[in-house]
Amino acid sequence: MNDTIRYIGDFTPGTGFNTALRGYLRALQYLGLDASKVRGVVSVGLPIGASTDDTMPVEDWTYHYLRGMWRDEPPINIVHTHASRFGDFYTANKYNIAVVAWETDKLPARQYEHFGKKATVAESLNKFDECWVPTRWVGGLLRDSGVNPRNGIHVIPHALLPEYAEAAARLTSKNCEEVNLLSIGTWNPRKNMEQLFQTYAGCGWSPLDGVRLDVCCVPPARDGAILLAHSRQANEHVQAILQGLPDGPESAPSFGLYTTYVDEKRVIERYKAAHVFLSTSRGEAFQLPAMEAAAFGCWIIGGGPWLQELAEIAGTLDEGGLVDLVPTQMIPIAPMPEVTGYEIGQKWWHVDGEALQEALVSAVSAIKETGSFEGTLKWAEKVRQHYSVRRIAGLIAKRLAVATEEIEGSAW
């Protein structure tokens, strides 16, 4: 297998895309793939020749693309990149696999232009021999949008990174004296962080009620100017919410807002301490934090079809209390142009505020009443098994076997 695969991935650091990519690469390594045989493609944020962690070396994709240096590469071509680039990385006379990582309904019809050629995402994907998607919902979304690759669309879920799985497996209980809530994501309109703070502030808890919200607000880039603008606006939004409370900021419940790049050790510690994970937007493109939190036994409060699949994997909605699905509604977003670049009037699916507050108060009350978290941790094992690198590697191996059989039986 070491000589049969070229894996093109986007190594943009500090993003869900990078985490999703690393999970797939770990699964390939589990199958015995030599890291040195895989080419990494950098989009933004990394210099040529850099690497993101212990996964794969990174090279500048334009150098190879424009010079035609890929024609002698291995016959299986796996492309895991942004929507606008699938067409760029299709390679003639290879077995082409497109890995579609997003859980959002805004991509298939979008049109992009690269090197003077216009195409929708759907048109680009139909050039490929097959597509891998993380959930059934994404697969259905693509089919409904006209995506129909020659060898079909196959569900290959995101893989839980081993360091997360190992830390979660060692967790046997959680202290319930203080109920810890957690949310992770960039502070931009589609992530709906502002509503999260408004809802939390409106629950009526005081600093003495033993409830705490931690938000790991990862900035959209490592660039210093963007980082400062992002942190300033996030804090300004939160302070405005607190000032609007009936009794002022002093009446606000406890919270922590981290607006810098958060390393994995700190994130793991937050997952270990958290009881409830909050996902307030269906526009969250990856939902990887929700899966990671579930692996640590957190209850999940949020909305959207991805979380429905997570609930099915965990067991039942009323046994173990893992996932509470909150209705979503499409609303226009208020942009922060210098940080996000979003246009006025764009709409995203956000969770219903009243339903979110009701679910949040109910979850906190239930946790305080039981004073125990062992039952939910049992369901976390199901999540860890379903998203384990070993299981994902097995699913990938089956698809690679199909590709290899076709290659060996053809004139390639």
Image: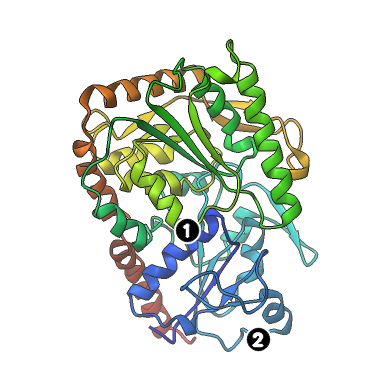
Residue in the picture at 45% in, 18% down? 206
Could you say which is closer to the camera, residue 217 or residue 72? 217
Crowd around label 2: few <14 · some 14–19 · many ≥20 (10 Å)? few
Asked whether, in this view, residue 151 is left or right of residue 281, the answer is left
- Residue 69 badge: 2
User: What is the residue that sits farthest to the bottom in this orientation?
Assistant: 72
The quarter of the displayed image where residue 62 is located:
bottom right
Placement of 367 over or under 50, stated as above or below: above
Residue in the picture at 38% in, 46% down? 271
* Element on which disc 1 rests: helix
Asked whether, in this view, residue 312 is left or right of residue 183, the answer is left
Can residue 291 be seen in the rendering of this structure?
no
Residue in the picture at 56% in, 19% down? 250
The residue where tag 1 is placed is: 20
* Element on which disc 2 rests: loop
User: What is the residue that sits farthest to the right in this orientation?
Assistant: 116
* Residue 369, x across and y down, in percent: 24, 21
Q: In the picture, which quadrant includes the N terminus?
A: bottom left
Q: Amino acid at mark 2?
A: Met
The quarter of the displayed image where residue 174 is located:
top left
Can residue 237 be seen in the rendering of this structure?
yes
Nearer-N-terminus badge (2/1): 1
Residue in the picture at 31% in, 20% down? 365
